[in-house]
Amino acid sequence: MEFPVKTGAPARHRTECAILPVFDDRQLHGATKDFDRAARGAIAKLVRSGDAPSRLGTCTLVHRTQGTAAARWLLVGCGKRADFTAKRLTTALGAALHALRTGATKEAVSFLGYDAPFGAAEVARHSVETARSSLYRFDELKSRTDPPARLTRLALAVKSGADVGAVRAGIKVGSAIASGSNLARDLGNRPANVCTPSHLADAARSIAKRYDRMDVEVLDEAGMRKLGMGALLSVTQGAHEPPRLIVLKYRGAPAKEAPIVLCGKGVTFDTGGISIKPAAKMDEMKFDMCGAGSVLGAMLALGELQPAVNVVGVIPACENMPGGRATRPGDIVTSLSGQTVEIINTDAEGRLILCDAITYAKRFKPRCIIDVATLTGACVVALGHVYTGLFSNDESLAKALLEAADRSLDLAWRLPVHEEYGESLRSNFADFANSGTRDGGASVGANFLSRFVDGLAWAHLDIAGVAWRAAANKGATGRPVPLLVDYLLNLDGQ
């Protein structure tokens, strides 16, 4: 999709459709006021008669325009003008694109951010991400597909004198994040008989081949066994599909600069193993690799943007299946760190593969480690489907991630990871168990992972509630790619 930048008098922009904001104060502002002036009060008349929308996300398409160069106007309700934030911009634009998707419109100009109370670069970035997300469809496995959206060009109108360079930079960032998010969606939406651990490895190889400054290494089961990754390999024992440890490196800064390590949980299907899950909604366990998908998506965005930072993506990928060779509750395994773990619940498998990945990541002498995982149902209970759960042992890292979450609109909420949450992980037979009390379960899981970081700055993102949507809109969301990329771009003021 193309995103040109338009400057000049709003009503003179020649377009098939002008997307115009209308607020609930019954007054016209910015570009909409300019259109109304050129149309001799036609829009104000619609407002007075109640035929113009004002509630956030409602739309009215006007065909009989006059006095302007636009063939149609799409009036979009934006709520209270004083409350018009970047988040409300995305809601309004998403509604507008939904309204245009099934029509004949091939190109449009958005004036929704023309008079926004925040920066034009921010408007551009979020507009691009919203447009790409709104038009995303996953139909690669359907024998018959819906025709693609006709809309292929969305121009962004800015005021004369605006920093067009900053706007174009925002478009570039938004496009890269959208590409990364869509890759994460594609990987998550593919079924487990397509998206296997080897498929994730192939996706990493494709990224490394496509972009400069990228290298990839893939360890097979024999390589992991040689290293001593007993925790990771205990999860995959019952599966016929071979596991993979994927290491994707991006070098954007001098080698002496310590990298950021992103660890993504890549369980491509999770039955729960011997501690088998209920049958209802088990099909959604193909999404248990969304942490891995988001790390690959973030790495793709880095390839697009080429920032001056070093990043290593470490992805433990496997299936968790029952079988004659599957790990049993009560088994004890030795992790790569040398610590022993009593496996009380084989469905608490994400922490087992991540603990070995975190230990492996320490060989890169990282500046910090951030793991991303659909780790606990308890995080869904705590935060629902709005916020990613953020746990960290480092105040500055936690602060930077929360700020990135706010800027990217990919929200996160900090939860505790105090040592008291580890009390229920005590074991009479091993150093500790992999599962404890259900009370505060998200913090218990985070506490388990914290035992493997050895004082390094570390953050854990539990995305169990935000990685996919269920019901009629079932599908992967691509979160938290925007959060991760924003964090990486803003290191040291980049």
Image: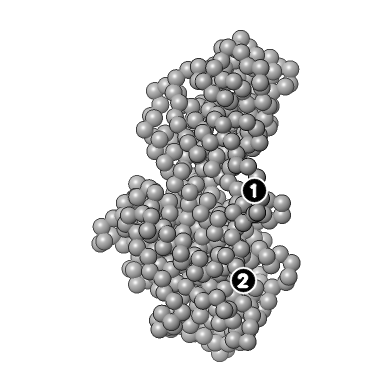
For mark 1, give the secondary structure. Answer: loop
Q: Position of residue 387 (x, y in %)?
A: 59, 53
Whether residue 455 is visible: no
Whether residue 172 is visible: yes
Say whether disc 1 or disc 2 marks the residue closer to the N-terminus: 1
Q: Classify 10 Å Cα crowding around label 2: few (below 14), some (14-19), many (20 and above).
A: many
Q: CA distance from mark 1 to mark 2?
A: 29 Å
For mark 2, give the secondary structure. Answer: strand
Q: Amino acid at mark 2?
A: Asp
Given residues 73 and 408, the one toward you in this image is 73
Q: Position of residue 191 (x, y in %)?
A: 61, 63
How was this image coloured?
one colour
Q: Is residue 20 left or right of residue 372?
A: right
- Which numbered disc covers residue 457? none
Q: Position of residue 150 (x, y in %)?
A: 59, 36
Given residues 2 and 425, the one toward you in this image is 2
Q: Residue furthest front?
A: 143
Can you tell which of label 1 and label 2 is closer to the viewer? 1
The residue positioned 65% from the left and 70% from the top of the image is 439
Q: Amino acid at mark 1?
A: Thr
Given residues 188 and 119, the one toward you in this image is 188
The residue positioned 45% from the left and 55% from the top of the image is 298
Q: With respect to residue 236, does 306 lie above or below?
A: above
In which image quadrant can residue 75 be found?
top right
**Mark 1 highlights which residue?**
145
Instruction: Tell whether label 2 touches label 1 (CB within 8 Å).
Output: no
**Mark 2 highlights which residue?**
270
Q: Position of residue 93 (x, y in %)?
A: 59, 35
In which image quadrant can residue 7 be found?
top left
The residue positioned 32% from the left and 54% from the top of the image is 212
Q: Is residue 289 left or right of residue 217?
A: right
